[in-house]
Image (cartoon, rainbow, N blue to C red):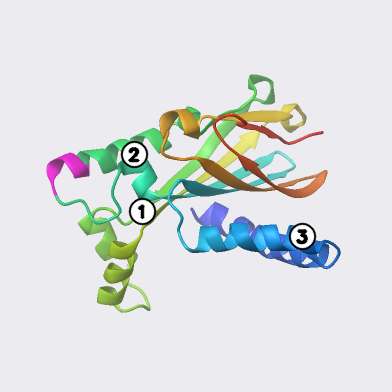
Amino acid sequence: MRKIALPLLLVASSLSFADTHDHDHDHKHDDDHQHDQSQLDSHVHGMAQLDVVLEGAMLLASLKAPAADLVGFEHIAENEDQIIQVYDLVGRMNLPETFWSLPEAAVCEAEDIHVEHHLLEDEDEQDHDHDHDHEDEQDHHAAHSDVIVDYYYSCEHPEQLEQIRVNLFNTYPSLQELQVQLITPDGQQGLTLNAGQNILRLKE
C-alpha cells in the first residue's frame, strides 16, 4: 500500500490539473466530467472508479467500488455468512484475474495487492485509530462504504500493454459502469467501461 499510495496521489493531482486546463476549452465536456465526478463522490451504486498509470515498467491500478456491489451490503458484517462474504471478496481481489486480464507478452508480475474496506469489526477499529472521532467514522461507513483495491505490477515488456480486458463486470454483475482515469506515456484520458465495452486500450 505504501508503494502505491504516493504515486496515485500525485497522479490524481496531475489529472485534476489537466482536467481543469482542458475544460477551459470544452464546456460540455466539463459538464459531463462534473456530472460523472459528482456521481462518484455521492457513492452511486453500480458505478466504480479506476485509476490506471503506466510509467516505464511500472503499472499501477487503484479501484474504488461500492461495497454493496461487491458483497451485497455496506455495513459491518453482522453474521457468519456476511463475514465469509467479506473474506471471499478479499480473496478474489487478491487474484488479479478477478480484476483484469493482462497480455501475457507483457510479462507483468503483481508485486503488491492491497484491499481496504470497513466491513469487519476488527479492521474498522484499526483503520480509524487516527485523527478522526471513531463514532463519527462508524456512522459514516454505516451510511455507505467503499472497497478500495490497489495493484502494483512490474512488467518486463510494458510496450506489449496495448489493451487490457477488465473482468470485473463478469465477477460482479451489479457493477454497471467503470469510470476510468488513465495515464500512459502517450498522455492521459478519461473513459467509461461497461459489460459490453470492457477493453481498456493503453495505446491507440
Mark 2 residue element: helix
Disc number for residue 117: 1
171 in magenta: no
Residue at (68% x, 57% y) in the render: 32
Horizontal relation, residue 13 to residue 84: left or right: right
Extreme-left residue of the structure: 79
47 lies above or below 93: below
Disc 1 to disc 2, how far (Cα)? 10 Å
Question: To which quarter of the image does residue 83 belong?
Answer: top left
Residue type of the residue flagged with mark 2? Leu
Quarter of the figure that contains the C terminus: top right
CB atoms of marks 1 and 2 within 8 Å: yes
Extreme-right residue of the structure: 25
The residue carrying mark 2 is 89
State the residue in front, 63 or 108.
63
Q: Position of residue 23 (x, y in %)?
A: 79, 64
Span highlighted in magenta in the image: 79-83
Residue type of the residue flagged with mark 3? Lys
Report how many numbered discs are placed on residues in the image.
3
